[in-house]
Image (tube, rainbow, N blue to C red):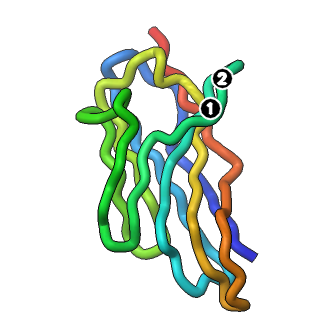
């Protein structure tokens, strides 16, 4: 079993900052990549940022220069600066991992709500 627990969401004014965290636990053998996705109301879930086990990162064009993804051990972070109302969404953490029983797959957190509003 793999558990992902996100934290750090909330209400922030435009131009403000938030830092999301996602801690992975359970029977994890190896993590190959970690990432953040978001889903705004009535929209499809989209990639925000991903980071590989080697430290390579990739960002959605809409957040480049404003968001930074990082990781430490089994935790992934998303530093969000210069937030805009269009960043309002539920943010989900995802990891690609192999468990101790050698099962590989993608594991998702339950999401944390980020609301950017004056």
Task: Determine the image quadrant of residue 113.
Answer: top right
Q: Which residue is mark 2?
A: 43
Identify the mark at residue 39; answer none if there is no mark. Answer: 1
Q: Determine which quarter of the picture holds residue 59.
A: top left
Please name the residue shown 39% across and 66% down the image.
52
Q: Quadrant of residue 106?
A: bottom right
Q: Looking at this view, name the residue that lies furthest to the right.
A: 1
Q: Is residue 109 above or below residue 1?
A: above
Report whether 3 appears left or right of 97.
Answer: right
Residue at image x 39%, y 72%? 53
**In the foreground, 102 or 3:** 102
Q: Is residue 45 above or below residue 71?
A: above
Rendered location of residue 90, percent (x, y): 62, 34
* Left or right of residue 88: residue 110: right
Q: Residue 13 at x, y = what percent?
A: 41, 17
**Which residue is at 58% across, 56% downward?**
94
Disc 2 packing (10 Å; few <14; some 14–19; many ≥20): few
Question: 104 left or right of 38?
Answer: right
List x then y, in percent, for residue 101.
72, 90
View extreme (left): residue? 65
Discs 2, 1 touching: Cβ within 8 Å: yes
Q: Is residue 66 above or below residue 35?
A: above
Image coordinates for residue 118, horizontal then vertical, percent: 45, 9
- The answer to whether residue 16 is above or below residue 3 is above
Q: Secondary structure at mark 2?
A: loop
- Quadrant of the snapshot with the N terminus: bottom right
């Amino acid at each position: 079993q793999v558990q992902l627990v996100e934290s750090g969401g909330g209400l922030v004014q435009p131009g403000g900052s938030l830092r999301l965290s996602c801690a992975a636990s359970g029977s994890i053998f190896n993590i190959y990549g970690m990432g953040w996705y978001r889903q705004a109301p009535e929209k499809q879930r989209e990639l925000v940022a991903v980071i590989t086990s080697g430290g390579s990162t990739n960002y959605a064009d809409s957040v480049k220069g404003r968001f930074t993804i990082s990781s430490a051990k089994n935790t992934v972070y998303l530093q969000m600066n210069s937030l805009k109302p269009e960043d309002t969404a539920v943010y989900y953490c995802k990891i690609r991992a192999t468990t101790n029983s050698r099962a590989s797959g993608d594991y998702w957190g339950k999401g944390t709500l980020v609301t950017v509003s004056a």
